[in-house]
Image (tube, grey):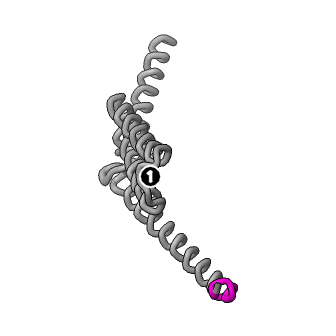
Amino acid sequence: MSQNHAEAHDSHHAGHHDGHDSHGAAHGSLRGYVTGFLLSVVLTAIPFWLVMNGVLANSTLTAIVIMLFAAAQIVVHMVYFLHMNGRSEGGWTMMALIFTIVIVAIALTGSLWVMFHLNANMMPDLHKM
């Protein structure tokens, strides 16, 4: 009697545990994780090489290229490690990501605008030199 109870208990937990793993999000495979890791390494190594070897003479252009590689790396991490796409969680993760990007863009733009105008208005004699 106790053996049947234990088997029923184990099968109940096995079925219950399987339900927790299917929340609509795609789980990664070893191939996906390795691909994401290799892309991350390449997207880190190229900017490092650009800076250490002084490949681009213009520092502004170098900074822009590094930021583009950083943005690409963010996308790689979101796709391969966080498994974010339009299908996971019924599209809510993508909606949350878009909302976050909009809020961060507003905060950064507003902060830069305020700092620029504070600098221009609070230190007018510095700009005359």
Quick check: can you spot residue 96? no
The quadrant holding residue 64 is: bottom left
Where residue 9 appears, x then y in whole percent? 47, 22
Identified by mark 1, the residue type is Ala
Q: Secondary structure at mark 1?
A: helix
Circle 1 crowding by C-alpha within 10 Å: few under 14, some 14–19, many from 20: some
User: Is 21 drawn above or below residue 47 in the view shown?
Assistant: above
User: Is 56 drawn above or below residue 42 in the view shown?
Assistant: below
Where residue 110 appears, x then y in whole percent? 54, 77
User: Is 46 drawn above or below residue 116 in the view shown?
Assistant: above
User: Is 40 drawn above or below residue 93 in the view shown?
Assistant: above
Is 123 within the magenta? yes
In the image, taking residue 110 as reference, residue 126 lies left or right, namely right
Where residue 10 appears, x then y in whole percent? 46, 21
Give the dominant element type of the magenta stretch: helix, strand or loop: helix
Please give the range of residues in magenta: 121-128
Residue 2 vs residue 94, the one in the foreground: 94
In the image, taking residue 128 as reference, residue 23 lies left or right, namely left
The structure residue drawn at horizontal position 39% and vertical position 61%, both measured from the top left corner, is: 95
The structure residue drawn at horizontal position 34% and vertical position 49%, both measured from the top left corner, is: 88
Name the residue carrying label 1.
70
Where residue 29 appears, x then y in whole percent? 34, 31
Residue 49 vs residue 97, the one in the foreground: 49
Residue 93 vs residue 103, the one in the foreground: 103
The structure residue drawn at horizontal position 45% and vertical position 14%, both measured from the top left corner, is: 4
Image quarter of the C terminus = bottom right
Is 23 within the magenta? no
